[in-house]
Image (cartoon, rainbow, N blue to C red):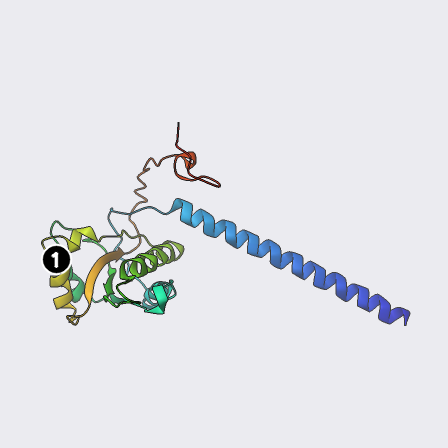
Amino acid sequence: MIINHIFYKMNKQVESRKRLRNIVIKRVKMNTFLELIHSRHSFRGEYQAVPVKREDLIKIMQAGIDAPSGCNKQTTSFIAIDDPHILKQLLNVIDPPIGQSAPAAICVLTQRIYAYRDKCFAIQDYSAAIENMLLAIIALGYESCWYEGHITDEDQIGKKMAHILNVPDDYELVCFLPIGIPKEKNVIKIKKKSFDERAWFNGFKKFK
């Protein structure tokens, strides 16, 4: 009986240490994730001539798929491009040029599907998906930049890109994400408004 009691206490101590260890690990992971969000920035520099792994592109797109979707209509789709010939065709129609040295890219597609009545959440859907992918890109050691207005303006560059990729007419290509390992960090510090100017508790407060 005494031996059983000793083993019982030892097991309880081991379980307690395991729980504490798991809590610490989760806290470290959360802090790392929050730092990832805080440090993310748009990259517009040169990329190394190093291919992006196919499995990493899958992980990035899966992050986009896992994003929330209004009424679960799942209006957002993705095309990863790692074929140099196809990528060159896409880059040739983008004017002014962007991401010319990127070894891979992801194009984001959207469908205008109504959730209910006249409510369509396609913009919210693909925005959430893009942010998920941008964070995944950084987490995997790559850099990128969210290019949207550049290809959806009056020049309709997105339509030319969609044609190259054989995208059906009921889809719209709304975003281009070049992906690669940066030649240099090229961190551009963008001054943002202070926390107190944009975030409050229990009501709106005008910044003084």
**Residue 23, x across and y down, in percent:** 61, 56
Quadrant for the C terminus, please: top left
Residue ID at (81%, 64%) = 9
For the image, the number of numbered tags is 1
Q: Is residue 195 visible?
A: yes
Q: What residue is pinned by disc 1?
A: 157
Instruction: Write down the quadrant of residue 186 in the picture.
Output: top left
Residue count near mark 1 (Cα–Cα under 10 Å), binned few <14, some 14–19, many ≥20: many
**Residue 192, x across and y down, in percent:** 35, 37
Front residue (pair 140, 24): 24
Is 148 positioned to the left or the right of 54 in the image? left
Residue ID at (51%, 49%) = 31
**Is disc 1 placed on a helix, strand or loop?**
helix
Q: Is residue 98 visible?
A: no
Residue furthest top as drawn: 208
Residue ID at (37%, 55%) = 135
| Residue 101 versus residue 110 in the image, above or below | above
Quadrant for the N terminus, please: bottom right
Is 200 positioned to the left or the right of 116 in the image? right
Residue ID at (48%, 41%) = 202
**Residue 145, x across and y down, in percent:** 27, 51
Front residue (pair 148, 79): 148
Residue furthest front as drawn: 117
**Residue 36, x across and y down, in percent:** 42, 49
For badge 1, the amino acid type reads Ile
